[in-house]
Image (cartoon, rainbow, N blue to C red):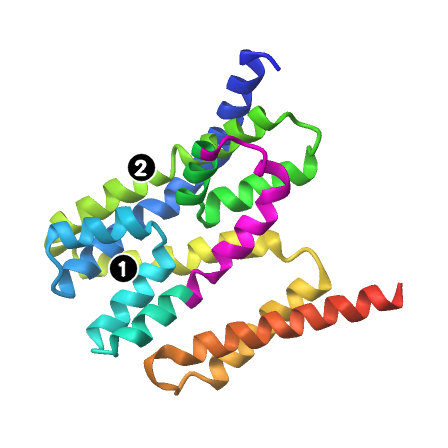
Amino acid sequence: MSAASTKSAYWQGLRAGLPFILVVAPFGLVFGVAGTDAGLNLIEVMGFTVLVIAGAAQFTALHMMTENSPTIVIIISALAVNLRMAMYSASLAPYLGQAPLWQRALVSYLNFDQNYALSIQEYDLRPERPLGQKIAYYFGAVTPIAPLWILSTFLGAHLGTVIPPGFALDFAVPIAFLALVGPALRTVPHVVAAFTSVVMALLFASMPYNLGIIFAAIIAMMVGAEVERRMETKR
């Protein structure tokens, strides 16, 4: 494996991650604004972002904190939202599991939706690539996203009070997830699971503390897994 090939893989990942800056920047700004509006000081907002580095879980926890939900419910809800990271890690293990411990630790810390979606698609397309190039691609995809997430959160926490409400920056949250989920719906079980999650979330919308989201996610995963099992049985 040449250094040039590894460098090329890094730049390839970086280029793939660039389009996400259009949604990550306003996403981070919104969290910075929401955090300060919820009464967190700058250190608390930035600590939240740097340590958790998972926007969906951060918004979930923040929203429930503002509703004075019990601490245990906040923790369980945030963990449930981030449960997908365990599935991400499991699917990356066959490709990156032989990397040195420090690299795997960094991959774990910087494992979020955007770079996972880019990397796993790349690994599926080119599984023959050497481990070093896979790692380089992964961190290339991280490069334009993670620092921008932290910086935009910082700016949001500082400038939140002067951003006009008419800017409606919260549009970035659903757009970011639509951009991630859309390309992933490649099989019938995926589509069925996504549809089930939407229906269940609407049915459970009246549950307290947003617990309906947890139940909807669990049921959707079960339905998707069952559809996949039945399809494989018929083959």
What residue is rendered at 48% in x and 42% in y? 115
Query: For mark 1, does the 10 Å Cα neighbourhood hold few (<14), some (14 to 19), or many (20 or more) residues?
Result: few
Q: Describe residue 138's horizontal placement relative to residue 38 as left or right.
A: right
Q: How many marks?
A: 2
Q: Quadrant of the C terminus?
A: bottom right
Q: Position of residue 92 (x, y in %)?
A: 58, 44
Q: Position of residue 105 (x, y in %)?
A: 43, 39
Residue 168, label in figure = 1
Query: For mark 2, does the 10 Å Cα neighbourhood hold few (<14), some (14 to 19), or many (20 or more) residues?
Result: few
Q: Residue furthest right?
A: 235
Q: Position of residue 112 (x, y in %)?
A: 44, 48
Which residues fall within the magenta stretch? 80-101
Q: Position of residue 188 (x, y in %)?
A: 72, 64
Kindly check if marks 2 and 1 are in contact, taking CB atoms under 8 A apart as contact. no
What residue is rendered at 25% in x and 50% in y? 29
For mark 1, give the secondary structure. Answer: loop
What residue is rendered at 50% in x and 25% in y? 10
